[in-house]
Image (spheres, helix red, strand yellow):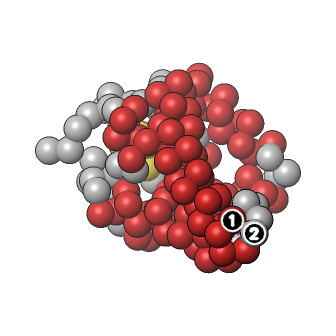
Amino acid sequence: MPHYPGGFWRRLLGNLLDALIVGIPLAILSLLLTGHTDGNTFTNLLSFLYYLLLPVLWAGYTVGKRIAGVRIVKLNGENPGIGTMLLRIVVGGLVYIVTLGIGLIISAFMIGLRDDKRGLHDLIAGTYVTTEPPQ
């Protein structure tokens, strides 16, 4: 059973903060590079690498998650690795795309209602989000 699971609102806050912290600078960079703010291959790659690598390098945190006081960990309490984050982001994202967003809605309810606060992407990757700081 996960220890000190991070609930829906803290996770949402972390995601919104990450969207602002990453999204605004990348939109400005995209505007400078292409004249459009809707992203391009380069800025999309930077965004993907932020969400993939930062939790691996920083004990499960992104900047937004750190501010919100939550981090991603594997079920055994270890920090996530590249493979874990790829499952969480890529495979989880594909499930949400294939289900036309229905999986994302189901995942939000799972995070809000389950005792362990795990969404579909957490189940796929064997992770959970916790309020417990790294050891």
Report the amino acid beneath label 2. Gly
Per the image, label 2 sits on a secondary structure element best described as: loop
Say which residue appears at 34% left-offset and 51% top-offset. Answer: 60
Is residue 9 left or right of 37 when viewed as pictured?
A: left
Quadrant for residue 44, please give it: bottom right
At horizontal 81% and vertical 59% (from top left) the residue drawn is: 98
The type of residue carrying mark 1 is: Leu
What is the number of the mark on residue 31? 1
Residue at the location (41% across, 41% down)? 65
Check the picture and name the quadrant holding the N terminus. Answer: top left
Residue 84, placed above or below residue 21: below
The foreground one among 64 and 117 is 64
The image position of residue 5, as x and y in percent, is: 39, 31
Q: Residues within 10 Å of mark 1 (few under 14, many from 20)?
A: some
Depth check, front residue: 96 or 54:
54
Asked where in the image residue 8 lies, by quadrant, the reply is: top right
Res 81 → quadrant: bottom left
- Asked whether residue 63 appears in the rendered view, the answer is yes
Residue 75 seen in this snapshot: no
Mark 1 lies on a secondary structure that is helix
Where does the image place residue 76, in percent across and percent down from the top left? 29, 50
Residue extending furthest toward the right: 100
User: Residues under labels 2 and 1: Cα distance?
Assistant: 4 Å
Q: Position of residue 120 (x, y in %)?
A: 61, 46
Of residues 108 and 23, the one nearer the viewer is: 23
Q: Looking at the rendered structure, which numbered label has been put on residue 14? A: none
Q: Is residue 115 above or below residue 119?
A: above
Give the labeled residue for mark 2.
35
Q: Are marks 2 and 1 in contact (CB under 8 Å)?
A: yes
